[in-house]
Amino acid sequence: MKKALCTCGLALVASIALIGMPGCSKKSIQSGGDSQSTQGMTKGGSSDSSKSGVGSFPDTGVQSGGGGLQGLNKNPSEERVGSGTMLAKVDPSSSAGRQMDEMLAEQAASAAAGLRDVLFAYDSWTISEDGRQALNRDAEWMKSNPSAQVKVEGHCDERGTSAYNLVLGEKRAKAARNYLVELGVGANRLSVVSYGKERPFCNEHAESCYQQNRRGHLVVKTGK
Amino acid sequence: MTQVKLISAWFGGVLLIAGLFGILESGAADVFLEATRPDFQKISLGVAGMQNGGGPDWLGGRIEEVLKKDVKRSLVFDLVDLPSLGIKTHDIGNGMGTGSKAVFKQAAEKGVSVLVWGKTGLKEADKEADVNMEGFVYDSGSDEVVGGKRYTGSSSVVRLMAHRFADELVFRYTGEPGIARTKIAYVAEHGTARELFVMDYDGYDARQLTADGFLNLMPRWSPDRRFLVFTAYRNRNTQDIDMIELSTGKRWTVISLGGLNITPALSPDGNFLAFASSHEGNSELYRLDTRTKALQRLTVNPSGDLSPSWSPNGRELVFVSDRGGGPQLFLMGSDGSNVRRLTFEGDYNAAPVWSPRGNWIAYVCRTRREYKLCVISPDGQKRMQLTTGPGVEDSPSWSPDGRHLVFSSTADGKSHIYMINADGKDIERLTFEGTHNSAPSWSPAS
């Protein structure tokens, strides 16, 4: 699978040719003197670059304008209309079933552990007093189950943009994680992930539902 | 305006949501978007029918219906109702005879600039799958039939024939390629998962692109329309930026740095990918050179920076930062230089997208806990709120001609996708199926 993708990427990179120099200057100003992690200068070396977290890129510049329009004609010749943008049939992925199995296993493990979630106020990622109490109990459980790995999922209500809510969800998840670390839980046993407003617990347009969705949700990780 | 009345008569079937009109903010009363400029003269155009010369009964009517909607959405033409002007369209025949001459004369007298008509039929009697369409154009300014088109294809592409002809009309009168053949990528709920889909710009022919069973979010097109970049949760714990090739379905990960990697946007020349990543702590903006793979960090700030959108010339980025508390729009050079704040009104401004014409930035603005669409000029001097009323609006995306936006809204309950003119008029709902449709991204013109 991965090999096939790399080959495809290489072929596409190899097809780079037409694009002229970009409009922007090449000098890279390092904002605020911050160190930057410059990746290898491999030309389409997808195997090298994928290790560093950057995959291969095809040439996506526009080759020609005009949109395939040929203009009106007094004696028009016949144009065949195809199906437009070709779209591949979606691959019925085995991943969907696996995701569902893993989610059910996580839910079962988390329910058995009795982990409590943290709820947040509108626009906020501050842990409330109720939230601290919930996390105190969670920390106790983690100390008495020293091999358990816990994931903190950050969630938001539907108000706000998808993108900003992913950042807000990450802030909420990290706030909960940081509090658990303060309580003495090893940071290496905790991971965070943000789902923004994309995995809501309920779907009504009402504050009672919004409150349920502004959440740091603690999940016992199963498997790897 | 009688014209407006005529149009709504023609398009009574199109869902226009009443009560949602553009509102000029204080101090912005002198703002005119292109399509509403007093000197912007739409070209009056009448469709004199598509005669069915064989083939399925619906063929001519279908093409005429799609063509008229395209003509109206182009905002280049004013679609006029010929019968209500007393023009007997059936006399037009093949456009050659004396009957057609009389129709042309009538149209010219009534101020109709362009007449369009055509016929449809089976390509060959024994090949039922193939249909054809001929379309012709009379221009009253030059008093001649300026030309036409002949299309053939399977009966499954008749909508595309009409779209193609509509784009030829726009091309003829503006030199622009038109938007009738553009696509919209978006996210739709599929069971408990959110997956990527692509549909025609008018909401038809939706196709599913991913089936991971979890989350794929916020697709954006490559400049050449061949790829989408998007936020992908490969499993439930890690989150990357992926790319998919539409024609093959091939898909691979382009950014997997760890942490949150979101809001990818390719530069107009395709040479850079701007995105937000939290792999060094909090969400910062980065720019990847897609040829050398050099990764440059653009922002350094303990707050969240996200949602970069390129200016049409690729020299600047507009983005969101909550460095002042709530999220606000900022501008900077595409190398991270010269950062300055753009929005000052309200405590929540996010999801900016720079118009392909360069003159406006659309975004989500919050007023009294309602999340609405706004536009602001890149110099910050002009600002306008485009939508009002209940519902959370999100993820605006410009049409390639800069005359429309698509966005998601919960105004009708569930999240669905809508189109709106850049001046806030003519809201049209595009999706009706399913439990959740969001994050629309309008393709470039072909």
Image (cartoon, coloured by chain):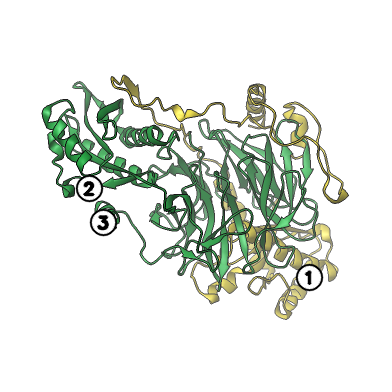
Please name the residue that numbered disc 3 is placed on: B2
Chain B: its colour in the image is green
Amino acid type at circle 3 is: Thr
Q: Position of residue B36 (x, y in %)?
A: 43, 53
Q: What distance separates the C-alpha of mark 1 from that of mark 2?
A: 72 Å
Q: Image check: A137 left or right of A84? A: right
In the figure, the shade used to draw chain A is yellow
Subunit of label 1? A
Q: Measuring 70% from the left and 42% from the top, which residue is drawn there?
A: B255
* Amino acid found under the numbered disc labelled 2: Asp
Q: Camera-side residue: A67 or A158?
A: A67
Q: Which residue is mark 1?
A: A139
Q: Residues within 10 Å of mark 2 (few under 14, many from 20)?
A: some
> At numbered mark 1, what does the secondary structure look like: helix, strand or loop?
helix
Q: Is residue A60 left or right of residue B29?
A: right
Assign a secondary structure to mark 3: helix
Q: Which residue is mark 2?
A: B81
At which x and y percent is residue B117? 23, 34
User: Picture quarter containing residue B352?
Assistant: bottom right
Within the image, what quadrant is residue A108 found in?
A: bottom right
